[in-house]
Amino acid sequence: MATNSLSINGTSPHHQACVPLAYSQPATKSSLKLRVEYDASFRGKKLKIKGKELEHVPRELFLMDELEILDLSPERPACLFFRLPKLSPAIGRLHNLRVLILDTNELQTIPAQISHLKNLEQLLLSNNFLARLPDGFGALANLTSLHLANNRFAEFPGEITSLTKLTFLDLSSNRLRRVADDVGRLRRLETLLLLYNELTELPESIGKLRRLRTLWLGCNKLQKLPRSYADLRGLSCCAAGYVTAMMDGNPLPLGPPPRVYRAGFDAVREWMQRGGEDAEQTEEAGDLDAGTDEPTDATDDPDAVGDPDGCGDLDGNDASDVEDRGEMLRSDTHES
């Protein structure tokens, strides 16, 4: 008996798993409402748009102002064939949205109307082609979690420093050369991920982020750490074995040396309090007197053989590994 291999609207059987069962029927507000579910992790009414609908998002969606969580990202690798090419300005009508998920699409811009989402708390925009944020983005006064990893930002978006309720910010795998001087305004920030950029320095104002518990700076071009780094005492408060401050893959010719920063925040703070370079020179002299040959930089470190910069195989354009390493940090997107 022959197997029926008919496709849905011309979609191959391989991709049928990404096409909603009712896709052959035009979406209506009523049919979309039937797909709204209560999401226990986000604690709200959620609608997931996936598969072929991402290429042509139903206009009726933007009439559903009762929505609290909207997911417009591909669900799994098999569905990456379909991605959202553009976000409609009508997104600004969904005034009750608290969580907006737009990961892994083909977005080059975000409409300014997103600033109308005054209740938005979590915004996921990683793995797109964004180089700037829209005017008015800083008006998202209730935003606590912002994911912008693996985009094309060459400059730290100035609008971000107006988001004073942020507790989580991920700008990993971009092209950032510097961090905004007024980043210290983000006094509630607990997690800041800046891996795989082109940073050469950090502003002194970073020392005002006293609530930071996680600061990942690996695989940049940092020459030194600002003196105010020693004020980030929250980096020493986490459980043993938890990486609070990651710095591998930076040249840091002015220190601290790898053996210091790999020992943790408290070791870095002590190194700074002892005078930084002078203390290191004294320490090196002591090592020579003692006849030790302990490695003093990344190229001498036997653990770095085969990977002298500590950055693995990533070239800064693929955040997949960064996404995996930061997964536990991103669990805040499932909390209030």
Image (cartoon, rainbow, N blue to C red):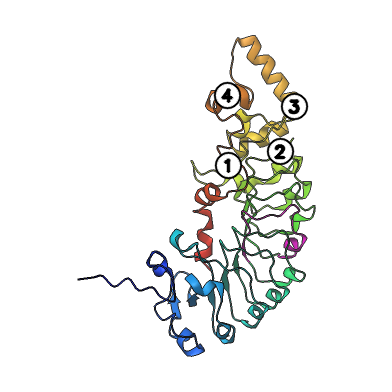
Check disc 4 and report its element: helix, strand or loop: loop
Span highlighted in magenta in the image: 144-163
Looking at the image, do the residues carrying marks 1 and 4 touch, with CB atoms under 8 Å apart?
A: no
First-in-chain label (2 vs 3)? 2
Q: CA distance from mark 2 to mark 3?
A: 19 Å
Residue type of the residue flagged with mark 4? Asp
Q: CA distance from mark 1 to mark 2?
A: 15 Å
Q: Main secondary structure of the magenta part?
A: loop
Q: Tell me the residue that label 4 is attached to.
A: 301
First-in-chain label (1 vs 3)? 3
In the rendering, at what x and y percent does residue 245 appear?
Answer: 60, 43
Foreground of the two, 297 or 37: 37
**Few, some or many residues within 10 Å of mark 3 (<14, 14–19, 20+):** some
In the rendering, at what x and y percent does residue 48 appear?
Answer: 48, 74
Q: Tell me the residue that label 3 is attached to.
A: 277
Q: Is residue 31 above or below residue 272?
A: below
Which mark is in front, 1 or 2? 1
Q: Which mark is residue 221?
A: 2
Q: CA distance from mark 4 to mark 2?
A: 19 Å
Q: Tell me the residue that label 1 is attached to.
A: 314
Q: Is residue 278 left or right of residue 315?
A: right
